[in-house]
Amino acid sequence: MSAYEITNTSFLQGQELHLLKTHVSTYLGSLRTKSVVVDGSTVRYLEGGEGDPVVFLHGVASPKTHYRSLMKSVSSGCRVIAPDVPGFSASSRLNNGRHNLRNLSHWLKQFMAALELERITLVGVSLGSTLSIYHAYHYPEQIDKLCLFSVPEARSLNGCSVMSIMVDVFERLEGTQDIDELMEMCFYYPPAMHSIIKNKMFKDLKVNQQHFCELLKDVSEGQLQIKAKLPHIKAPTLLISGESDPICPIAFARSLDEQIPNSTIHILSHSKHLTFLEKHGEVVALLNDFLRHGV
């Protein structure tokens, strides 16, 4: 290969990298991808803004980048942080032990220490909100405020264990039609998705199928204890749930509000499990008001 050919190839690759960098910059806006070592493992996280720290915990098989629009919308006056939660993320695992609430809460404590965070507002969605409740109960001195999206019901939905329903969804993943079922659970108006995207989602979930099933079973053990912890939550708490959420039904959401001493609840119409994506404008207004004034 001639020197000219090498230079030409390098130039083209450089152009591709430049375009990719531009796309990522637009996608993340002012947010930046960073990393920190926690318990011997590298944890990647998004961060942006300055001020009081707000940590976002995603749910199972839901990447931290789902939070990017919400983080960018509340980053004024706040330092927003969204880590890959071990086990919840397909790309991150705990080094030792099962992915139960106890071990994940200990990991969160270590993550905060690595970033030198003493007190935070904790924002969780789905099982990320379950972990948030658990952590707020065991480490109240670390939590200023809690914002909980779509807390999964621990015990029953139409006579069935919610966790068993979720495990069943993951266990019988056979094709892109199962991606459609997941979207029906998450969105009141499921977004149109190209077959290429569906196939990619299915392959990613299929590769991690066994892990996510085991994770849900591990978390469910501690989740049954969450109800007893609710009256002892000291932090001001904002609860947000979709009125048609099959995983966090309205009755359960209102029960959470009744049991957490200093809480307020907002039920959003025409939405299901992922309210922060489906009702972005309403959620941004509620979260910004909560961060400024509390409940």
Image (cartoon, grey):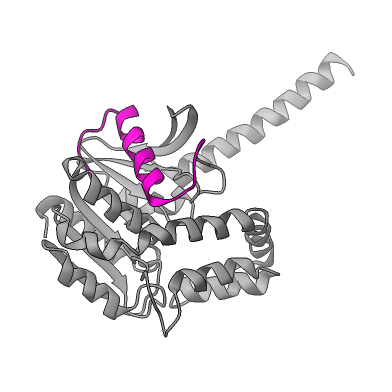
Give the percent coordinates (x, y) of residue 164: 50, 71
Tell me if 215 is positioned left or right of 55 in this view: right
- Of residues 81 and 258, which is closer to you in this image? 258
| Percent x, y of residue 174 | 70, 69
Q: Quadrant of the C terminus?
A: bottom left
Q: Above or below — where is 41 with respect to 295?
A: above
Q: Specify whether residue 30 is in view.
A: no
Where is residue 31 drawn, in percent x and y?
Answer: 39, 39
Magenta residue span: 95-120
Farthest residue toward the right?
1
Q: Determine the residue positioned at 59% across, 38% down.
A: 19
Is 218 on the left-hand or right-hand side of 131? Answer: right
Residue 53 drawn above or below residue 172: above
Residue in the picture at 57% in, 75% down? 181
| Relative side of 177 to 154, left or right | right
Compare residues 79 and 167 and report the one nearer the observer. Answer: 167
Relative image position of residue 239 (x, y in whole percent): 23, 65
273 in magenta: no
Q: Quadrant of the N terminus?
A: top right
